[in-house]
């Protein structure tokens, strides 16, 4: 349906227009309106499917060359030395029953396509009709999720379940993207799970059904009890359904899977490992689960004791690199693009929607009880470990495999990659207050929020088979020779950026040059890419600029190739481990990096407390703050720097904003803000979203780039207050 006031497309049955807020009469409210979606992704506006022709290009920038994409993952939050000795408590006895999840499945019988649309990078909504068995459900493709026109089909699927939960929806949702796979933002699927207030009190869980009929739990973004609807996130195009969780009281007091960290986790430690010192936790947790469920056949082939030899090399710090090190690093590398949504400071999962009296979304209320019930259900009913995210001032990924319930608390048994082989690690949930504690970590560090990260949401675990096969060959069967010619590993420089140069050669293993892109991942989770030019049988050369902070900077390198449909895949290569560059650049009071992933021109604006703004037309301010470049050849990075030795306005707020200067469609942006380097107040925050000029005519935004301007072409990111240790 379309709004009768502004003409924008909105979900069928909407009570209010999701663009202008106009009343649509007595229609039932939608599951999750466009306004809610905008809050999730920080985007000011999103065009409907049938958008008008884009405005003509205004030639400020000529795009080409290096593509720099920052994909945000807080990979340095679990710093070395921040954990304490665990308290040993053995409350759990593994279940002797084989995992039930292997016997749960779905056999598809009928698919009915009920709604179609062509979606481009403006995104859109595809709603199921009112006569559908899943009426009230719809699919939201976010702006900038796709980079070309994609034919989207949505419908219903019927079939036969085997050993599934009794509460499972008998009709599943079908989603087809016409073969397109490389989503840069997750798609949101919204289900109508309740028809009255009583039903709305239940807790729904989304399920992804893969091509074999196996069911996998998904990540719940939010639950709208008022509308009886909930939303899940996915990088898949497949079949999806949902079921209803039991009450906490319905689960037995004690239960555990057969997974044990001392048998099925990594022997390598995440914190202080010889390859990656602080952020491979998500890759390690999910790989351990994948191997346990799909590859372990007996106690003799448990992961913990495998791939410990031979020596693969020596790190720049002199540590021995084992095959397990390489597996953990590659699992992190291959999952970074999708798992970055777990660490974005603006995301909220397992949350309840909050609304004002007019039905407009005002925020999201976090509720740890939703995740706790998801964890208990995965362990008891599905009999499989479940990925868990824990957040406070830091963030971390672990794997829950058992629980014990008493009258006042639930103790969740976890595999924590920071404590290899330790079967006593735990999360404690207080039933009355719905709060959590993590005894192995300092108060406040990882005890604020609990989520289940949803194995079925991500496609990146599909790469684990490739990692395992490489590991079985001691990574000797790699098909790409990757050489970094500059810098020498461990080089000391005086600059805040450096160009990493080298070559890629696949001729020996493939008989031709097949690499399409180089991807460099920093230890802050930034990803920088460059498209490779093939020169017959000669190796492809690359030169990628990366930002440097004061001290040690670490980078990993991926090789990507595109299949016949243009979808990206990772290629194994012989350069594993860290590339390290040490910089003597002074410490910063504020350091900001901006990148984006489309053709528009996006600009960074930082305004100091005196009202001076560093931006593309005036890069320097009197306090010493400066913008390094107005990028004219790629997609960032642009950097704002305020050194601690400058005339910093300590204790006062600096404002960070973005402006969409020009382009012909929305783009995803990524901003990393580091403040107070080298002090007790040091912190790094991550922001991502979508920005465009939707809703403006050309003349409206051509002259809307002055500091302090406002409109749909502007996004407010944050305020930063620089502090000294003596504050």
Image (cartoon, rainbow, N blue to C red):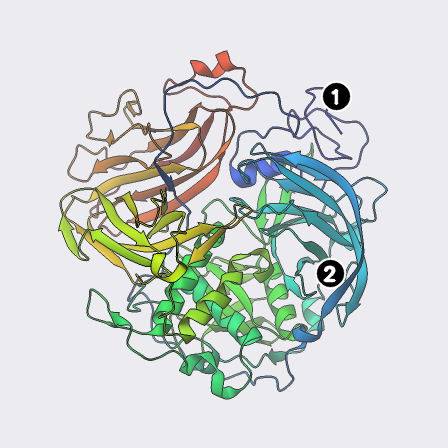
Among the 4 quarters of the image, the one containing residue 323: bottom left
Q: Is residue 608 above or below residue 292?
A: above
Res 414 visible: yes
Q: Nearer the viewer, residue 660 or 397?
A: 660
Check disc 2: other Cα within 10 Å, few if <14, some if 14-19, many if 20+: many
> For residue 21, which numbered disc appears in the image?
none
- Residue at 37% across / 54% down in the picture? 558
Q: Is residue 220 left or right of residue 204?
A: left
The residue labelled by disc 1 is: 4
Q: Is residue 403 left or right of residue 669?
A: right
Q: Secondary structure at mark 2?
A: strand
Q: Is residue 67 left or right of residue 351?
A: left
Among the 4 quarters of the image, the one containing residue 59: top left
Q: Nearer the viewer, residue 496 or 333?
A: 333
- Residue at 62% across / 58% down in the picture? 218
Q: Quadrant of the C terminus?
A: top left
Instruction: Looking at this view, name the residue that lies furthest to the top.
Output: 699
Q: Position of residue 77 (x, y in %)?
A: 36, 57
Spatial separation of the CA atoms under disc 2 and disc 1: 36 Å
Q: Position of residue 67 (x, y in %)?
A: 37, 39
Q: Secondary structure at mark 1?
A: loop
Specify which label sits upstream in the sequence, 2 or 1: 1
Instruction: Looking at this view, name the residue that lies furthest to the right.
Output: 131
Q: Position of residue 401 (x, y in %)?
A: 55, 74
Q: Quadrant of the N terminus?
A: top right
Q: Nearer the viewer, residue 51 or 725?
A: 51
Q: Is residue 90 above or below residue 686?
A: below
The residue labelled by disc 2 is: 243
Numbered circles on residues, count: 2
Q: Position of residue 255 (x, y in %)?
A: 61, 79
- Residue at 37% across / 17% down in the picture? 706
Q: Are marks 2 and 1 in contact (CB under 8 Å)?
A: no
């Amino acid at each position: 349906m379309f709004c009768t006031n502004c003409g924008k497309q909105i979900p069928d049955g909407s009570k209010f227009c999701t663009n202008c807020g106009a009343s649509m009469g007595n229609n039932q409210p939608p599951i999750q309106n466009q306004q809610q979606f905008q809050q999730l992704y920080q985007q000011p506006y999103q065009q409907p499917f049938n958008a008008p022709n884009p405005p003509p290009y205004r030639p400020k920038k000529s795009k080409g060359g290096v593509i720099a994409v920052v994909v945000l993952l807080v990979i340095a939050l679990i710093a070395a030395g921040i954990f304490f000795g665990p308290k040993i408590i053995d409350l759990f006895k593994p279940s002797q029953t084989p995992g039930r999840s292997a016997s749960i499945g779905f056999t598809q019988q009928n698919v009915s396509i009920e709604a179609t649309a062509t979606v481009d990078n403006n995104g859109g909504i595809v709603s199921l009709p009112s006569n559908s068995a899943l009426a009230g459900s719809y699919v939201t493709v976010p702006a900038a999720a796709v980079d070309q026109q994609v034919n989207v089909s949505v419908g219903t699927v019927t079939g036969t379940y085997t050993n599934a939960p009794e509460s499972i929806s008998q009709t599943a949702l079908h989603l087809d993207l016409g073969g397109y796979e490389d989503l840069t933002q997750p798609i949101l699927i919204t289900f109508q799970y309740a028809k009255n207030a009583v039903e709305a009190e239940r807790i729904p869980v989304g399920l992804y059904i893969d091509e074999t009929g196996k069911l996998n739990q998904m990540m719940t973004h939010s639950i709208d009890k008022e509308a009886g609807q909930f939303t899940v996130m996915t990088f898949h195009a497949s079949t999806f359904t949902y079921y209803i969780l039991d009450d906490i009281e319905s689960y037995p007091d004690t239960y555990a899977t057969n997974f044990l960290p001392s048998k099925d986790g990594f022997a390598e430690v995440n914190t202080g490992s010889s390859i990656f010192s602080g952020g491979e936790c998500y890759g390690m947790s999910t790989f351990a689960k994948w191997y346990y469920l799909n590859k372990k056949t007996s106690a003799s082939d448990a992961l913990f004791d495998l791939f410990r030899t031979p020596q693969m090399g020596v790190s720049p710090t002199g540590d021995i690199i084992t095959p397990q090190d390489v597996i953990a690093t590659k699992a992190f590398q291959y999952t970074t693009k999708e798992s970055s949504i777990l660490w974005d400071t603006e995301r909220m999962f397992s949350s309840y929607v909050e609304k004002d009296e007019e039905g407009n979304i005002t925020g999201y209320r976090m509720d740890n009880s939703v995740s706790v019930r998801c964890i208990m259900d995965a362990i008891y009913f599905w009999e499989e470990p479940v990925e868990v995210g824990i957040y406070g001032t830091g963030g971390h990924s672990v794997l829950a495999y058992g629980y014990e319930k008493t009258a006042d608390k639930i103790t969740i048994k976890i595999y924590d990659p920071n404590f290899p082989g330790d079967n006593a690690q735990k999360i404690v949930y207080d039933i009355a207050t719905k709060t959590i504690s993590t005894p192995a970590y300092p108060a406040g560090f990882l005890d604020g929020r609990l989520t289940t990260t949803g194995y079925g949401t991500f496609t990146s675990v599909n790469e684990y088979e490739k990692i395992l096969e490489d590991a079985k060959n001691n990574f000797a069967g790699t098909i790409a020779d990757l050489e970094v010619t500059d810098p020498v590993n461990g080089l000391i420089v005086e600059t805040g950026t450096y160009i990493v140069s080298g070559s890629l050669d696949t001729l020996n293993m493939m008989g031709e040059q097949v690499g399409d892109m180089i991807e460099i991942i920093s230890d802050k989770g930034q990803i920088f890419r460059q498209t490779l030019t093939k020169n017959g049988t000669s190796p492809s050369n690359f030169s990628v600029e990366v930002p440097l902070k004061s001290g040690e900077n670490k980078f990993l390198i991926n090789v990507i190739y595109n299949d016949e449909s243009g979808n990206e895949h990772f290629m194994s290569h012989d350069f594993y481990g860290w590339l390290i560059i040490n910089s003597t650049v002074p410490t910063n009071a504020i350091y900001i990096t901006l990148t984006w992933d489309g053709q528009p021109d996006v600009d960074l604006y930082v305004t100091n407390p005196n009202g001076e703004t560093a931006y593309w037309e005036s890069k320097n301010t009197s306090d010493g703050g400066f913008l390094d470049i107005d990028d004219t050849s790629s997609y960032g990075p642009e950097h704002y720097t305020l050194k601690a030795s400058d005339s910093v306005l300590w204790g006062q707020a600096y404002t960070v904003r973005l402006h969409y200067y020009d382009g012909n469609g929305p783009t995803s942006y990524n901003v990393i803000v580091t403040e107070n380097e080298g002090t007790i107040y040091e912190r790094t925050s991550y922001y991502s979203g979508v920005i465009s000029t939707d809703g403006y005519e050309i003349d409206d935004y051509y002259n809307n780039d002055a500091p302090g301007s406002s409109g749909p072409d502007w996004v407010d990111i944050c305020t930063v207050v620089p502090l000294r240790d003596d504050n």
